[in-house]
Each structure stands twice: as structure tokens, then as C-alpha cells.
Amino acid sequence: MSASVKSLLSTLTSKGPHRVLRGNLAIAGQPGVVYTPESGLSLPAVAFGHSWLTSASNYRGLLEHLASWGFVAAAPDTERGPIPSHLGLATDLLTTLDICTRVRLGDGTISVHPDRLALAGHAMGAGAAVIAAAQRKVAAVAALYPAPTAPSAETLAPDIDTPALILAGTDIDSVSSNAIPLATAWAGPVVLRQLDGASHNGIIEGRRALAALGAGRHESKTARTTRALLTGYLLHKLLGDKTYAPFADPEAVIPHTTVIDPDAPRNEEKKPKLSVGQISQLLRR
């Protein structure tokens, strides 16, 4: 294991050098939030989609972390109900990117470069990011613990040649995760990493509707590692910083993670039936 990769991961788990500002996307007509560095021109930007029954506020730490490392990180705050439209969230992600690239942010000292854009999301939001990437060319896609959506993200993946990072937890083979079929179908360069001891809902911050039932409890270690992996990947893909090339290298050994070969033979076990909550996620308006 490379000591340099260990050091980079440790560095990226901490906040970056930039002071962070928060803004309201609703001023530009799109409900949501945007976090930016204090200043900067031609910055990279990430539009981030939330999971089922969550909101943009449940990812504040993640969005602030990206902004502290020099990214404009914006998240639409729509499709928050029990029967969301995945296509609707994808559309809002694209609208969010349009706002970031066409509007001067902050007091006018912040701008985004149109070629330094990424679509990202968690669970349902990861699928929405893929749906959006099928409609618009971006520099990178990041699917964090992706979950099934309608339309199916893996049916769109063969037509997307954008580089992608896919993260999964120990429940990678469960009905809650489509990380393996998504990575298998992806047309472009893809890295699929499984995080040690992580569950698919571990990065959600704060209280949420299902927490009382034991679902979606925050995992601080999972959140820290996820932030570092995502930040390193985007620093390399959006800014071309070769220092962080290991985060986009499927051969790199990174602490607390395992690279998964989506084409490798796997034990096929009978999977449980979908729960009511999982069925609700797949329903469309």
C-alpha cells in the first residue's frame, strides 16, 4: 500500500483551504442550495442529487467539504416525497448546472467553467445523476451507493462514455444496490470501490424519517472516506490534477476500500423480495 495514497486520503478527509459560502438556488428559480469557495473564477462545479425521503440539508457536510476544496457544490431540493420522480430530479440536476454556469455567484467574484462539470448523487440521487448524464455531456459522474431508479440507470449506462466513480457498501449485493450492474453496463472508464464496513445509507446526515426504524443511521467513518474519495476523484477529473490520479485508477490500492471487478463471477443467491419502501422508490408520478 502506497504511503503517498494513505497521506492523500488522510488529507482529503479534512476540509480544504477555502472559506465556504452558502447560497440559495431558489433566487434563480430552482429550489435548492449552493456552496462555493469565497471567490474564484472558472471553478469546477458539481450538481448533487439526494436520496429517497431526504433533502439537500442531509448532505450539508459533504457539500461544504467539496466547496472547501474549490468546487461549487449545488443540490436541488425537490422530489422529497415518498413517490418521487427520478426523471424530475434528473431534470433539476441539469437546471442546477445551468444556473451554476450562467449566473455569477456570490458577489460576482465566483464563476464556473462550462467544461468542468460533474453530476453526482446518493442512492436514488445517484440514479438521477446517471439519467441526467445520459442527456448532457459532463466531465465526470459520481454514483454514491446507487439504488434502482425508473428509468433504470443501467439501461442508460451503455450510451454514456463519461468517466465514472461508483462507490458501494458491504450491502453491494442487496436489492438496495445496483452498483454492480451499473458498473458492468457503463460505457466509459469506471471505478467501482466497496468501502469497508459501510452501509448504503451511511453518508446521510442528521435526522430522517426512517431513522426511528433503524434505517439510514449516519456512519461518520463512511462519510469521511466517501468525501475523500469523491473529492480526490473530482480534483483529478475536473481539474486534471495528477496528484490525485490514484483516486481514478482502478488498480490503485486505497485504504479502507476494495476495488470490485463488476465482470468477475459472483455467488448468485436468492435475493429477498422488495420491501414496501423500496417499491415506493421505484414508483413514478
Image (cartoon, grey):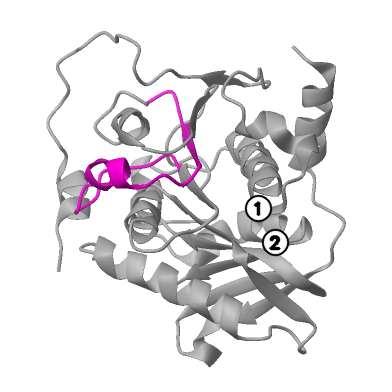
Q: Secondary structure at mark 2?
A: loop
Residue 40, placed above or below residue 244: below
Disc 2 vs disc 1: which is toward the camera?
1
**Highlighted magenta segment, given as a residue range:** 144-171
Q: Residue at x 77, y 55 (%)?
A: 69
Residue that mark 1 sits on: 238
Q: Amino acid at mark 2?
A: Phe
In percent of width and height, residue 278 lies at 21, 45
Confirm whether residue 79 shows in the render.
no
Q: For the C terminus, which image quadrant? A: bottom left
Magenta span contains residue 147 = yes
Residue that mark 2 sits on: 71
In percent of width and height, residue 90 lies at 35, 65
Residue 204, placed above or below residue 85: above
- Few, some or many C-alpha atoms within 10 Å of disc 1 (few <14, some 14-19, many ≥20)? many
In percent of width and height, residue 247 lies at 65, 33
Contact, mark 2 vs mark 1 (Cβ under 8 Å): yes
Q: Secondary structure at mark 1?
A: helix
Residue 144, placed above or below residue 253: below
Q: Residue at x 61, y 34 (%)?
A: 248
N-terminal of the pair, mark 2 or mark 1, is 2
Q: Is residue 249 left or right of residue 167?
A: right
Frontmost residue, 100 versus 145: 100
Q: Amino acid at mark 1?
A: Leu
- Could you give the CA–CA distance between mark 2 and mark 1, rounded to whole angstroms? 10 Å
Q: For the N terminus, which image quadrant? A: top right
Confirm whether residue 47 shows in the render.
yes
Q: Residue furthest right?
A: 17
Marks counted in the figure total 2
